[in-house]
Image (cartoon, rainbow, N blue to C red):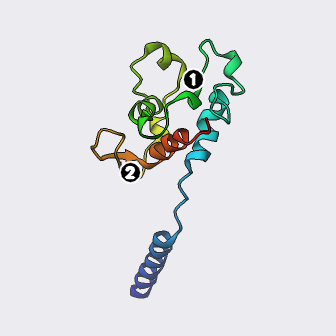
Amino acid sequence: MRGMAFGGTIVTLALAGCIATMPKEPTPTGAEDFATFCASCHGADGKGKGAVAATMARAPADLTRLPQGKDFPAARVMSKIYGYQGDAAAQAVMPEFGDLLEGETVLYDSGDGIPTPTPLRLVQLAEYIRALPR
């Protein structure tokens, strides 16, 4: 009986070691999340001409018209993606992606000089949008 208990302990420890060393799934890039969550409405180029755009009552925003560089409205863009929109008409059309962007956080300064814990994927997606060709 004692041997079975000892054997069970070894198996349990071995399995725990396997779980601890299993590689974690890589975090999708901003480009991958854009293709998954945004391109169907905003288009692969971000110009608002995605596959479903013509069927929508309100045209998706042309993301290439957003200011670039230090004038990029990072906080506003991330708020819209996350689901804090303030604009009831836009909220009815733009789905909330906050739950999909949870997970690892990073300190990110969205332009107000205050590094704030922000979901990594949300930052990556906003930075991808910032870098869209104009």
Quarter of the image with the N terminus in it: bottom left
**Position above or below: 124 against 43:** below
Taking the spot 46% from the left edge, 40% from the top edge, the residue there is: 69
Residue 111 spot, x, y in % from top left? 34, 39
Question: Mark 2 — residue?
Answer: 105
Residue 90 spot, x, y in % from top left? 49, 18
Residue 48 spot, x, y in % from top left? 64, 25
**First in sequence: mark 1 or mark 2?**
1
Number of numbered discs on residues: 2
Q: Is residue 63 left or right of residue 3?
A: right
Residue that sits furthest to the bottom in the current view: 3
Quarter of the image with the C terminus in it: top right
Q: Nearer the viewer, residue 67 or 59?
A: 67
What mark, if any, has residue 124 been given in the picture?
A: none
**Position above or below: 84 against 19:** above
Q: Is residue 120 left or right of residue 93?
A: left
